[in-house]
Image (spheres, rainbow, N blue to C red):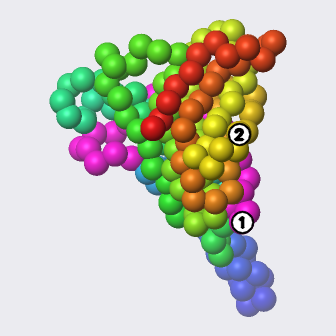
Amino acid sequence: MKRLLQSAIVLLFVVLLTSCTLSPAAAVRREPLLPASDGEPVNFEIRQSVHWRDGVLVYYTFDTDQLDPPGVTHECGYSAYVQRGLLDWHTTSGGGICRASSEVTDSFQRTGDSGVGDTGTGAYGMVTDPAAVEVRVTWSDGLTDTVALVNESYLVIHAGQTSVERVEALDAAGTVIAAYSLQ
């Protein structure tokens, strides 16, 4: 009887463990924030993540052809703020931007900003210029943050409810080689 009880406990533990989402990225893969559409995203990729307070901001990209106008491929960049629950991680807030592929002509792609819980704002995007090594983000409160590109992308969090005014791609010498205004 004792062995049966031990086996049942081990089995229950294994079932609970395998049903849990063990990482913020896995939570986003399981239940990503997506635009309202009928289709599944393609080319889904987690670009990077940043720890913030009691959670993690995850930046991910995907393509879809289910937005208006239908049949046109849209390139999307989204961020999701993920927090740890009792047994797993879950998405609490976030958002993103999608642009028709034909509209993407500059060095900045899938660029946007979104709230990070109620304590910060995240800026995210991709920079395709091969000379770019970092990005400087200018916030609406006048402060700036400079971060290195990782996986052709940037992700930075700023304290407070603010917005991104400008993003500049910098080369290795710190020279601005491309700029993008979100306002």
Q: Which residues are magenta?
A: 34-55
- Tell which tag, 1 or 2, sits nearer the viewer: 2
Amino acid on which the number 2 mark rests in the picture: Thr
Which quadrant of the figure has residue 134? top right
Instruction: Tell me the residue at 52%/44% (across/down).
Output: 113
**102 with respect to 166 (left or right):** left
Q: Residue furthest right?
A: 173
In the rendered image, which residue does mark 2 sit on? 144
Along the line of sight, the residue nearer the viewer: 125 or 16: 125
Picture quarter containing residue 70? top left
**Residue 85: percent from left, percent from top:** 63, 71
For residue 142, above or below residue 148? below
SS assignment at label 2? strand
Residue 54, disc: 1
The quadrant in which the N terminus is found is bottom right
Examine the rendering and report whether any part of residue 77 can be seen.
no
**Residue 14 image position (x, y, % from top left):** 67, 67
* Res 142 seen here: yes
Q: Position of residue 129 (x, y in %)?
A: 60, 12
Q: Which mark is residue 82?
A: none
The residue at the far front in this view is 142
Q: Quadrant of residue 136?
A: top right
Crowd class of label 2 (few under 14; some 14 to 19; many from 20; radius 10 Å): some
Tell me the distance, in whole angstroms, between the alpha carbons under discs 1 and 2: 23 Å
| 165 w.r.t. 43: above or below | below
